[in-house]
Amino acid sequence: MKYNTKNKRRMKTNLKPLAIIAFIGILLQSCSSDDEGTPPVAAPVISNFEYGEGSSHSEDQVAYKGSDIHLEADITAPGTVSSISLAIHAHDLEPGEGEVEWDFEQTFTDASYLVINPTFHEHVDIPSNIPAGEYHVLLTVTDELGNSTEAEGHLQILDPITLSEISISETVVRGTDMHTEFIVHAVNGIHQITVDIHAHGIEVGEGEVEWDFENIYSEGYHELTEAEFHEHIDVPATAPAGEYHITFTIEDEDGSILEYETHIDVTAS
């Protein structure tokens, strides 16, 4: 019996490419299975994000000019953290006289943060010469794989000293007294209240004596966070008639100062 060796060799030759194709297919399938079996690393998660007045570690989302903000957050990051960024900026606030805009940005790369699951805890100083109002707070956490997560909110930045219910005499007859009354709110406590009264270019007539008044009030107000300032100031009978400028200066226990200015007309009768 004779064998067809030529056909046999042809069959072996044809089988080789098929075997190679089959092997490549198995290899690709294996690699695909391996890729599908390795889930991607999850993006960081920010939780318990809190911020507020720094001195009391408040969570009330309120802070005061000239003090600081306490910020804290728990970060769950399966991939090691590469950076934590914080941004604070105003919401359409117009700076007043002597005030400037405030935009805060900082990226934190401290070794204590470049780990898995760090706790973010920082205090940020607030300038005393910025507008009071609403500010936007944005915290961004990025891991080494480029995954990032944001947490945001709003913070009310207030003046540490405010006045309300202001009632001050507009005119006063010399030889009587002028009435002054207002409510002082001072989150850090009142240190003292100064009243300064002086004339605006008034000529001193015969029998008159130039009148400048300045007095410091602390008794009954010192260290109170809220107080009613209610005083009667005697105007000498010899004071020249005319317009006087009044400045009320309220200083708190941290050295912050608020000035309130007004005018009063002193009349002869």
Image (spheres, rainbow, N blue to C red):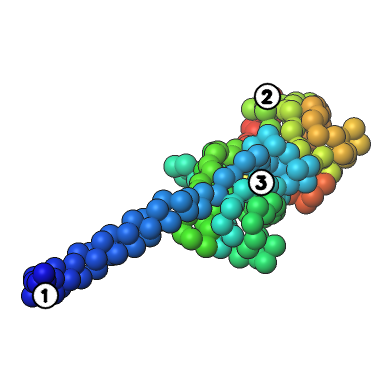
Examine the rendered structure and indicate whether residue 52 appears above or below residue 44.
Answer: above
Helix or strand or loop: what does disc 3 sit on? strand
**Mark 3 Cα within 10 Å, few/some/many (few <14, many 20+)?**
some
Q: Quadrant of the C terminus?
A: top right
The image quadrant that residue 235 belongs to is: top right
The count of marks equals 3
| SS category of the residue bearing label 2 | strand
Give coordinates of residue 120: x percent, y percent. Answer: 67, 52
| Residue pointed to by mark 3 | 74
Residue that mark 1 sits on: 5
Q: Label 3 amino acid? A: Asp
Give how far across and how far down residue 145 sits, in percent.
48, 60
* Quadrant for the N terminus in the image: bottom left
Q: In the depicted view, which residue is nearer to us: 65 or 200?
A: 65
- Write down the residue under mark 2: 165
Q: What amino acid type should be assigned to the residue bearing mark 2? A: Glu
Foreground mark, 2 or 3, reads: 3
Q: Is residue 2 left or right of residue 215?
A: left
Q: Is residue 2 above or below residue 145?
A: below
Residue that protrudes farthest toward the front in the picture? 1
Q: Earlier in the sequence, mark 1 or mark 2?
A: 1
Q: At 75% from the left edge and 32% from the top edge, which residue is drawn?
A: 184
Label located before the other in sequence (2 or 3) = 3
Marks 1 and 3, the one that precedes in the sequence: 1
Q: Is residue 11 visible?
A: yes
Position of 86 with respect to 213 (left or right) is left
Q: Residues within 10 Å of mark 2 (few under 14, many from 20)?
A: few
Measuring from the top left, give residue 177's x and y in whole percent: 78, 27
Whole-angstrom CA distance, mark 1 to mark 3, is 76 Å
Tell which residue pokes out farthest to the right in this image: 219
